[in-house]
């Protein structure tokens, strides 16, 4: 608790100074805005709430899959094999999420300009990139799968899971592109609908294949294939029904225009580097926890990170909303409304952070108990983990800013700032961990993680000159 409190006190001056400069900028423009405060709030929640619901379905599906695996043969072996298989695909999907982020910002700006010819081109370019990436993954599945299973110390069950589920990847990547395009088009309801549908299909067919057809873990993988391709089919049908009048006639030469393709890949290259750093930090966090002298460190940190993930799913809803709205107002050159939008996004992000903090302070012990079974050993683990709960209490407040700024920078397509801030903060994470790991033990991981979050936010505010770079794009 002492170390986390000192960390907050040390970092607070950085945030307060930079945020003060940023907030002052919100009041520099005296023009009347298109939207009032109430309408901006409605727009933010119209986009944020469906995204939060979509996000929440992800861990719920994971819980169901884990529960199914725990009832197949040797529970520990099944759950462990599923966890390794899922982590491999998480790494793969995270590193293709650039398609969603790159598509949403450009589409939102074109939507803001009322340029539906460009939104049509962006949809087709996104789908073209998804097809190419999906085909490459399938062609490289054998060497990638063998290496991944070996690196993760997997077994035959993991191998069977991987080579079954790999056929879902092209559809999963295409859904990323579709989600990004829909968010750019200011529509969060269709992504939510598709996400809920995909997860329900996955759960239904997991039961059918795993138990009804006695396929075990491979059945859960096959359920992913059915769910992802079903979701892709549904999404294409919904897009046709809701947007066929918005699509414009385009030529192949326009879709593969070299200048536009270079811009698309320049933005996506920055996001790829940023996402790789993100994966590196989270993967190393788990690996370092497993190597701690305290054998309970991995279990404790996993439970604590689950609590942090709960907050990140809520806050990401507002980050996605900022992607769509910032891109929209940048494209429309509506500076006044852009300022108002960002101001309100900050307010709601901090409100979400304070709700999470209150939840952790009041119900931290009860939440930790959800992850363990009854017994003296489990109770002792929870008590030990509670010694670190103050990191989870502190981190929502310092991570709300970088989460939201990622959305703002994506909407404004200032991806170089995202890339450079992530590179610096990732470097700092490793430096702090290795400097203090002998003296602080498990606290060194959390100190590095907290520093990583703060520096991401500080660097993005500093590199954008207190968001002046964002506002300049709307002038």
Image: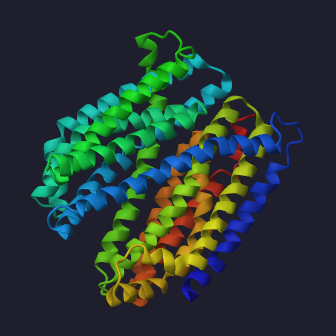
Q: Is residue 304 visible?
A: yes
Q: Nearer the viewer, residue 66 or 353?
A: 66
**Above/below status of 190 relative to 306:** above
Q: Point out residue 222 in the picture as x, y percentages from the top left corner.
A: 22, 43
Vertical order, 153 against 238 (above or below) = below
Residue extending furthest toward the front: 212
Q: Is residue 398 left or right of residue 272?
A: right
Rendered residue at 78%/39% (across/down):
337
Q: Quadrant where the N terminus lies? A: bottom right
Is residue 380 left or right of 366 when viewed as pictured?
A: left
Quick check: 146 left or right of 308? left
Residue lying at 32% horizontally and 39% vertically, measured from the top left: 227
Where residue 393 appears, x then y in whole percent?
A: 58, 75
Q: Nearer the viewer, residue 245 or 73?
A: 73
Q: Is residue 406 above or below residue 261?
A: below
- Residue 23, image quadrant: bottom right
Count of picture labels: 0
Q: Quadrant of the C terminus?
A: top right
Is residue 267 among what the camera can see?
A: no
Describe residue 77's horizontal placement relative to residue 473 as left or right: left
From this viewpoint, which residue is outermost toward the left?
A: 156
Q: Position of residue 183 (x, y in %)?
A: 55, 36
Q: Residue at x 23, y 55 (%)?
A: 85
What colour-coding does the image apply? rainbow
Q: Quadrant of residue 16?
A: bottom right
Q: Looking at this view, is 72 or 371 the one in front? A: 72
Res. 375 image quadrant: bottom left
Q: Is residue 267 positioned above or below 236 on the image? A: below
Query: In the image, residue 395 lies at what x, y percent?
Result: 56, 70
Q: Residue at x 48, y 87 (%)?
A: 387
């Amino acid at each position: 608790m002492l170390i986390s409190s000192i960390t907050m006190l040390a970092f607070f001056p950085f945030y307060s100074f930079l945020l003060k400069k940023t907030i002052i900028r919100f009041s520099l423009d005296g023009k009347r805005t298109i939207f009032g405060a109430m309408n901006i709030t409605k727009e933010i929640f119209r986009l944020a709430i469906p995204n939060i619901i979509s996000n929440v379905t992800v861990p719920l599906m994971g819980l169901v899959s884990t529960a199914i695996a725990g009832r197949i043969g040797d529970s520990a072996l099944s759950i462990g094999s599923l966890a390794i298989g899922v982590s491999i695909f998480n790494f793969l999907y995270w590193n293709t999420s650039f398609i969603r982020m790159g598509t949403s910002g450009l589409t939102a700006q074109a939507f803001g300009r009322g340029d539906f010819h460009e939104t049509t081109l962006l949809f087709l370019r996104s789908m073209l990139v998804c097809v190419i990436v999906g085909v490459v993954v399938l062609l490289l599945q054998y060497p990638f799968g063998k290496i991944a299973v070996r690196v993760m110390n997997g077994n035959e069950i993991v191998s069977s899971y991987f080579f079954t589920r790999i056929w879902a990847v092209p559809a999963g990547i295409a859904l990323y592109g579709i989600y990004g395009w829909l968010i750019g088009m200011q529509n969060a309801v269709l992504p939510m609908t598709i996400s809920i549908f995909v997860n329900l299909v996955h759960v239904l067919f997991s039961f059918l294949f795993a138990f009804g057809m006695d396929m075990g873990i491979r059945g859960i993988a096959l359920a992913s294939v059915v769910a992802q391709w079903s979701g892709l089919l549904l999404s294409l049908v919904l897009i046709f029904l809701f947007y066929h009048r918005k699509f414009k006639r385009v030529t192949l030469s326009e879709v593969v225009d070299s200048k536009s393709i270079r811009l698309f890949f320049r933005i996506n290259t920055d996001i790829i580097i940023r996402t790789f750093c993100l994966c590196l930090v989270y993967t190393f966090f788990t690996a370092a926890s497993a190597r701690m002298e305290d054998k309970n460190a991995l279990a404790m940190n996993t439970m604590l990170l689950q609590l942090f993930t709960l907050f990140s799913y809520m806050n990401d809803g507002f980050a996605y909303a900022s992607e769509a709205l910032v891109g929209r107002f940048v494209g429309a050159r509506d500076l006044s409304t852009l300022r108002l939008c960002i101001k309100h996004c900050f307010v709601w992000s901090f409100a979400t952070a304070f709700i999470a903090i209150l939840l952790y302070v009041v119900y931290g012990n009860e939440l930790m108990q959800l992850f363990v079974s009854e017994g003296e050993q489990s109770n002792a683990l929870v008590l030990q983990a509670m010694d670190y709960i103050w990191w989870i209490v502190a981190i929502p407040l310092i991570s709300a800013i970088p989460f939201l700024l990622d959305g703002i920078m994506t909407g404004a397509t200032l991806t170089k700032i995202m890339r450079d801030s992530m590179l610096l903060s990732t470097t700092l994470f490793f430096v702090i961990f290795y400097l203090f790991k002998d003296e602080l033990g498990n606290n060194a991981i959390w100190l590095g993680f907290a520093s990583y979050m703060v520096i991401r936010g500080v660097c993005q505010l500093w590199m954008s000159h207190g968001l002046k770079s964002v506002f300049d794009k709307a002038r």
